[in-house]
Amino acid sequence: MNGAAAAGPRPARRRWQAVDGIVLLDKPNGLTSTQALQRVRRVLQAEKAGHAGTLDPMATGMLPLCFGQATKACGQLLGRRKAYRATVSLGVATDTGDADGQVVERRDVPAVSDDALEHVLASLRGDRRQVPPMYSALKRDGRPLYELARRGETVEREARAISIERLEVGARSPRSLDVEVVCSKGTYVRVLAEEIANGLGTVGHLVALRRLWVEPFAAARMVTLEHVEALGGASGPETRDWLRPVDEAFVELPVLRLDTTQSLHLRQGRTLDPPGAGTPGLLLRAYDDAHGFLGLVEVDDDGRLRVQRLFVAGAGTASTQPKT
């Protein structure tokens, strides 16, 4: 028997499909965002996939996964507000700022009054600048900072503009705080935990982090990885109600309905001149006469509509019926 025969038949090559939509995954602890994305992608057999906003392996909660046409929305989702619940351990610092790192410092935790705690929190709210951590995916000369950090290197990082809209403490003990945060893009909650601890006269790190929502999905239901994988290749609407239509990423925008000719022109990238389009700079989500989502258009200074981004549906795309 030759080697080829002994090896047996080769496994069938995976057939990727054109799948469009958004999955609001409740990412489990222990997986990177990319690992979670690839596991859902294999279930859907989706040709194109991306995620909007990295979660650290120890973090859980909402991770928007974008497939097909929805990958064009990743950039917009990255720029949206986010909410987190975190537990900060006081008195111990790690090199990564979370429980996955190595302990680098221990310090006493002073007694802190409610007023003193609120003073620290107030100083961290609002628009300000924050220095990103070394253990991050930001790049320096094409290399992620975490690679340099693992080699023991530290480089200067430019502080970035962030906004802390809400920062409140719930349960607390002498050595830990439960914190809820609503913040802008670019905010590192690990760094925020260290900033809180420093303000209290000690050091600290994150021992738990959960992303509660990403705008505009504050009230949306997440789906677990176990639920997605349990369905396997099932394709009926009742089994994939967790695959959300692309236009749900833009539900806050006004709806624009187009007739057949206008829809064709928009698909061709032409400028439209409908009456009463709106004020200059207004962004709208455009639909064809069959309620199919076409993309985003912007009103220019002359009151005409220009394509901002097309999301022309591929095979298998669902679309939210715009309300009148």
Image (cartoon, rainbow, N blue to C red):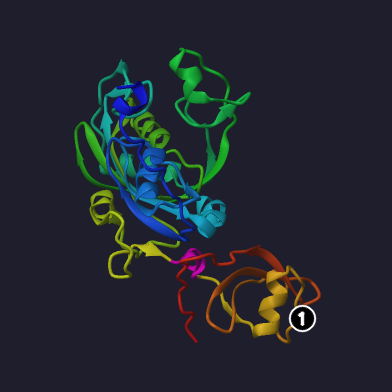
The quarter of the displayed image where residue 259 is located: bottom right
Residue 83 versus residue 272 in the image, above or below: above
The quarter of the displayed image where residue 118 is located: top left
Question: Which residue does the image show at 28% across and 70% down from the upper left?
Answer: 238
- Kindly identify which residue carries mark 1: 273
Residue 104 versus residue 119 in the image, above or below: above
Residue 208 versus residue 245 in the image, above or below: above
Closer to the camera in the image, 162 or 195: 162
Please name the amino acid that badge 1 sits on. Asp
Q: How many marks?
A: 1
Closer to the camera in the image, 95 or 32: 32
Q: Can residue 166 be seen in this view?
A: no
* Magenta-highlighted residues: 245-251
Question: How far from the left and from the top, in percent, is residue 145?
Answer: 52, 24
The local secondary structure at tag 1 comes to loop
Closer to the camera in the image, 305 or 216: 305
Question: Which residue does the image show at 66% across and 70% down from the upper left?
Answer: 297
Q: In which quarter of the image is the N terminus?
A: top left
Q: Residues within 10 Å of mark 1 (few under 14, many from 20)?
A: some
Question: How far from the left and from the top, in percent, is residue 108?
Answer: 25, 21
Q: Is residue 109 visible?
A: yes
Q: Residue most toward the top?
A: 152
Residue 265 shown left or right of residue 161 in the figure: right
Question: Which residue does the image show at 30% across and 35% down from the upper left?
Answer: 58
Residue 303 versus residue 168 in the image, above or below: below
Magenta region includes residue 260:
no
